Amino acid sequence: MPKLLILLLSLLLTACASAPVVSVQSSTLPPASMLPVTEEAGDGLRYTMELETWEQSSQTEDGTPLVSCVYNLPAMHVVRADGSEVSEAETEQETRALEVAEAFNQEFTAWTGETDFEELTQEARADLEWRQTEQVEWTTGYVLELDCTVYQTEKLISVTGIHYNHLDGAAHPNMWYISWNYDLEAGEFFTPDFLGEDTELHTAVTEEIVRQANAPAKDGTIPAENYWEDYAEIAANWNTTAVAFDGEDMVVTFSPYELAAFGFGPQAFRISYGYLEPYLSDHGRELLGLSEG
């Protein structure tokens, strides 16, 4: 998702953010069904994941801060059995592996686009000039951050991102949850509905979210009593919010203000694989490690 779009979305929020714990795991390459086996390549290739920091800032001629960006972005690398990184393919298997990695990485390098950053800088400059005219204080400028958590198996990479921004003078920082799910065999990102045979998966997850929302919390309160009146309709759009996987559950997270007021923070719902399994397609079960296929 482009940075400026996220900025516009997050302007609707007034939530405080905190950096998540980063957990990155690595795995072997997908099965040979998608990666032609060659004698030279063997079975020793691996996809490895790292978080790489991209930083950019801008200021006026007199040093007044305009925009500061710090993004911790996931990056996929292809590594041989001897630990050396594949930068140029020497086999068909390595060629395919690099294509899979490049398709993943392109999604995140889009966050570092100079055009978007320049547009944001110009927006901040115009804001600063208006505030100077109105004698409104300007201190930190626009501060934007992205932190990611990565979960990886032999077939799946699931990324959860928390995008944070604080516009100078705003009462609170803003926070927006984002997710990306990647099929390593196909070399493509997918939406959660892709895992189901039909619409039954979508309906079942919606029903489970509504059930959990009406179940008593540890303190005895009913979460749904604090949600917007149309929370069930919002819950039905769960596939358009942040949906990630962690090995045991599918985690659906609604950002602050999506389901309830800021004071209640983000709302997360854990849907177990056991609950999901009857509604999954064969490929969905394979992606989640619930079959031997």
Image (spheres, rainbow, N blue to C red):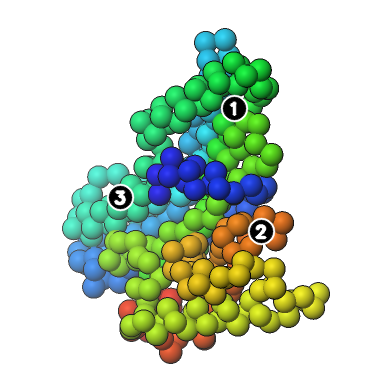
Q: Residue under label 3, please give it.
A: 102
Residue pictured at 48% horizontal, 43% vertical: 8
Of pointers 1 and 2, the one earlier in the residue sequence: 1
Q: Secondary structure at mark 3?
A: helix
Which label sits on residue 141?
1
* Precedes in sequence: disc 3 or disc 2: 3
- Nearer mark to the viewer, of 1 and 3: 1
Q: Position of residue 243 (x, y in %)?
A: 49, 66
Residues at marks 1 and 2, CA–CA distance in whole angstroms: 26 Å
Q: Is residue 92 left or right of residue 68?
A: left
* Numbered disc 2: secondary structure: loop
Of residues 171 and 205, which is closer to you in this image?
Answer: 171
How many other residues sit within 10 Å of disc 3, few (<14), some (14-19) or many (≥20)?
some
Name the residue located 45 percent from the left edge and 24 percent from the top edge.
122
The image position of residue 145, as x and y in percent, is 56, 41
Q: Position of residue 201 (x, y in %)?
A: 42, 82
**Callout 2 environment at 10 Å: few (<14), some (14 to 19), or many (20+)?**
some
As drawn, the residue found furthest toward the top would be: 62
What amino acid does circle 3 point to? Glu
Q: Earlier in the sequence, mark 1 or mark 3?
A: 3
Q: Position of residue 231 (x, y in %)?
A: 57, 70
Q: Is residue 230 visible?
A: yes
Left or right: 14 in relation to 35: right
Asked if 29 appears above or below 124 in the picture, the reply is below
What is the quadrant of the C terminus in the image? bottom left
- Residue 43 occupies quadrant: bottom left
Q: Is residue 160 above or below residue 53?
A: below
Disc assigned to residue 283 = none
- Label 1 element class: loop
